[in-house]
Image (spheres, helix red, strand yellow):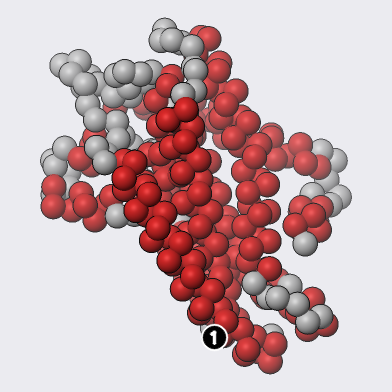
Amino acid sequence: MVRREIQARYAGTAFGLLWSYINPLTRFLTFYFVFGLLLGRGLGLENFAIHLFAGMVLVNYFTETVTSGTRSLLSNKGVIGKMALPREMFPVASMLVSLWHAVPQFIILVIACLVTGWWGDGPMWVPDAVGMGAALLGLMLMMVYGTAFGLMFSCVNVIFRDFQRIVQTFINMVPFTAPMMYPFHIVADGTRIPSSWLSVYLANPVAEAVMLIQRGFWYPTCAPNCAVDPATGAALPEFASDLYPRGFIMLGIGLALLVLGQWVFARLEKTVPERL
């Protein structure tokens, strides 16, 4: 199913799978020139394009997993009507297809980090084990939460066809709920949003995953001071102080949510064939 969906997406195109590399490359170059050179200077962030693109890789993966998973049963209603097979495979296959499309983005991200290290004023980008573990944890968070939501939403979308549009409406807000287009310190300083709301902001698994992947890819390009006050030169916080414990706690919550998603799917899937 994964192979069929990948082939169908690029059927009839001249460049085929090469588009999976062209699109993220042009997106990164846009981020570099617009955000890195024009807008990023006043935020006090080094290598702001890497900061933004690293988060965007995971956010794109998560949003594509949720939206394609929500539509997966409707998109495969012809197969479901003809064959008896575990219907969970459709949202799971959507997650794997999204992961396949995320691989070129990771490759572009690694190349951008290496080039930044060669051309920048700081040290060459050298990934560390802790940072790569953080990035892997962030990817696992988006994989688990995206699959859980895909399982739950796919059956609901069959029963209530407008649900995919509701999901898309909220998905459009997701990129703005994580510190990638803006630095973490403007959320944590308590001047723009009340400090009491910071815990609510950090309860978002997407924000946690974005900071984890930034720790793996962005932070090594500019450590030890990646965020500084443009006026005073003082160091500013790049991430939440409890980044790693919070990540593992959210992974546990995500696994519980995945079990819940499977339970909801099992309860609702009996009505799927007749509603399709």
- Tag 1: amino acid: Arg
Q: Quadrant of residue 262?
A: bottom right
Camera-side residue of 133 and 205:
133
- 39 vs 213: above or below: above
Task: Report the residue at 29% width, 19% height from top.
Answer: 225
Q: Nearer the viewer, residue 112 or 259?
A: 259
| 158 sits to left or right of 75 | left
The residue positioned 68% from the left and 54% from the top of the image is 97
Instruction: State which quarter of the image contains the C terminus.
Output: bottom right
x and y, in percent, of residue 124 in the image: 48, 11
Q: Is residue 208 above or below residue 216?
A: below
Q: Position of residue 167 (x, y in %)?
A: 48, 67
Mark 1, residue position: 267
Quadrant of the rendered image containing residue 182:
top left
Residue 129, position in %: x, y? 47, 27
Is residue 121 visible to us here? yes
